[in-house]
Amino acid sequence: MIKLPGDNGAASPRLSIITVVRNDAVGLQRTLASVSRWKGGRTEYLIIDGASTDGTLQVVEAYRALVDHLLSEPDNGIYDAMNKGIALARGDFLLFLNAGDELLVDPEELLDGCGDTTVLVYGRANMRNPDGSLSYVKGKRLKSNFRFFKGMPLCHQAILYRREAMVPFDTAFRIMADRVSTWQLLRRYGLRRSRFVDRIMVNYYEGGFSGSLPPSVWQEEEDRFYRLAGVPWYRYKKQVNRLFKERVRIPLKRLLKRD
């Protein structure tokens, strides 16, 4: 285990940026370069490494002045590593910027004007293909927590969570614990205690761990989420909506275009 703490005698920071990584030196280099452009005096930066065996730690060393806390030890997956970051963080708010992601704004600026009752600040994210081309932009003002049942409406890399209100990630979920925790936080405190900023906060590169898993894993986790939320029937609603789209709406649009 490598454990390099920051200055615990310093005043508590406004923001903690947490990056989790394992054997991704190239992606981490991109993330560190972006954080170096925006990290302010009220921000601490933590890297939680899963005992990497490639050149990841050498990349961290090259940016040592930027990193306030490095923890390198085996973990039980991405969300376990993110929970370790929560436990070590001291900031009022948390930003989870994983290896490969790029920060595009000054996150401290986004927190200016936030009152003590705000538990979540969220914006938009460029969802990019692995080759860097833009797939789409994700994130808009939430009107209802029910939106989380359709899918994850936000990119968690474009969310600032108040640390004291943060719901730890449920490590029983391998790929959608961020969706579950964000829904739980907003259910507990209400949308009125969240704040939307119409800014593109990050570049997120698709095709990571979650994209490598079969659809059956996604379905099993989504079913578990629905049971947790008390809406097990929502699975069938989605299936009906999908069938209607595939067999009625899309063919009808094609037919109308021909006319």
Image (cartoon, rainbow, N blue to C red):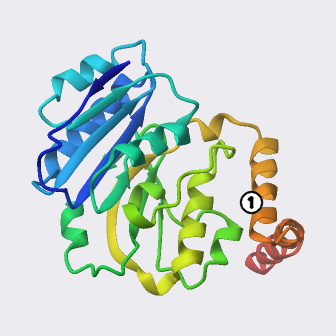
**Nearest the eye: 254 or 214:** 214
- Identified at 41% across, 25% down, the residue is 24
Q: Amino acid at mark 1?
A: Phe
* Classed neighbour count for the residue bearing mark 1: other residues with Cα under 10 Å, few (<14), some (14–19), many (≥20): many
Compared to residue 147, the image places residue 101 above or below, namely above
Image coordinates of residue 195 in percent, x first then y, are: 38, 79
- Identified at 51% across, 44% down, the residue is 206
User: Number of numbered discs present?
Assistant: 1
- Identified at 44% across, 40% down, the residue is 84
- Identified at 39% across, 43% down, the residue is 85
**Nearest the eye: 109 or 250:** 109
**Nearest the eye: 99 or 187:** 187
- The part of the image, by quadrant, that contains residue 198 is bottom left
Image coordinates of residue 44 in percent, x first then y, are: 21, 48
- The part of the image, by quadrant, that contains residue 253 is bottom right
Where's the C terminus, which quadrant? bottom right
In the figure, is residue 70 to the left or right of 99?
left
Image coordinates of residue 58 in percent, x first then y, are: 26, 17
**Nearest the eye: 226 or 140:** 226
Image coordinates of residue 241 in percent, x first then y, are: 83, 72
For the question of whether residue 103 can be seen, the reply is no
Q: Residue furthest front?
A: 9
At numbered mark 1, what does the secondary structure look like: helix, strand or loop? helix
In the figure, is residue 13 to the left or right of 246?
left
In the figure, is residue 23 to the left or right of 185?
left
For label 1, the residue is 225
